[in-house]
Amino acid sequence: MNSERLYTLIDQPHISEKVSNIGDASNQFAFKVARSATKREIKKAVEKLFEVEVVSVNTVNVKGKVKRNFRGTVSRAKNWKKAYVRLAPGQDIDFTRGIT
């Protein structure tokens, strides 16, 4: 697999209350990933970028929300893919590392 593709797979960490609770309970993190990404590619990308050991990866296709304004026009947010990554016990990802 191309190393450039690994860097383009992971868009950003997905931070929400649900993800925080899951992370505390079972050492999982969530990421917004490319819609074409596979579980194997996500696993390799996270291991390479954050230097951690990944145990499992679960993915979810999230449908964009439909929005209506006061005039009745309809717009829709883009669909996106979310990956839940479970790390080995004792592993952790520090998202603030590298920020000065």
Image (cartoon, rainbow, N blue to C red):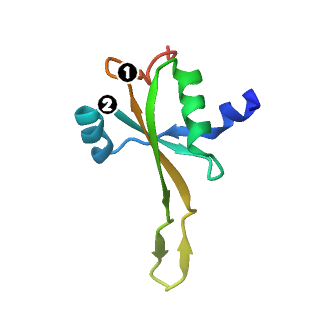
Amino acid type, residue under disc 1 in the picture: Asp
Left/right of residue 25 with respect to residue 72 in the rendered view:
left
Q: Is residue 35 above or below residue 88?
A: below
The extreme bottom residue here reads 72
Amino acid type, residue under disc 2 in the picture: Asn
Numbered tag placed on residue 92 in the rendering: 1
Task: Name the quarter where the N terminus is drawn.
Answer: top right
Task: State the SS at label 1.
Answer: loop
Identify which residue is drawn at 59% across, 38% down.
40
Foreground of the two, 62 or 59: 59
Task: State the SS at label 2.
Answer: loop
**Precedes in sequence: disc 1 or disc 2:** 2
Residue 79 position by quadrant:
bottom right
Can you give x and y, in whole percent of width and height, for residue 28 in the image? 35, 35
Can you give x and y, in whole percent of width and height, for residue 2 in the image? 77, 31
* Total tally of numbered discs in the picture: 2
Can you give x and y, in whole percent of width and height, for residue 54 in the image? 46, 28
Q: Is residue 78 above or below residue 68?
A: above
Q: Is residue 36 above or below residue 62?
A: above
Q: Is residue 72 above or below residue 61?
A: below
Identify which residue is drawn at 41% across, 23% down.
93
Numbered tag placed on residue 43 in the rendering: none
Numbered tag placed on residue 27 in the rendering: 2
Left/right of residue 4 with respect to residue 84 in the rendered view:
right
Q: Are marks 1 and 2 in contact (CB under 8 Å)?
A: yes
Foreground of the two, 96 or 49: 49
Spatial CA span between label 1 and label 2: 8 Å
Classify 10 Å Cα crowding around label 2: few (below 14), some (14-19), many (20 and above).
Answer: some
Can you give x and y, in whole percent of width and height, for residue 16 in the image? 34, 45
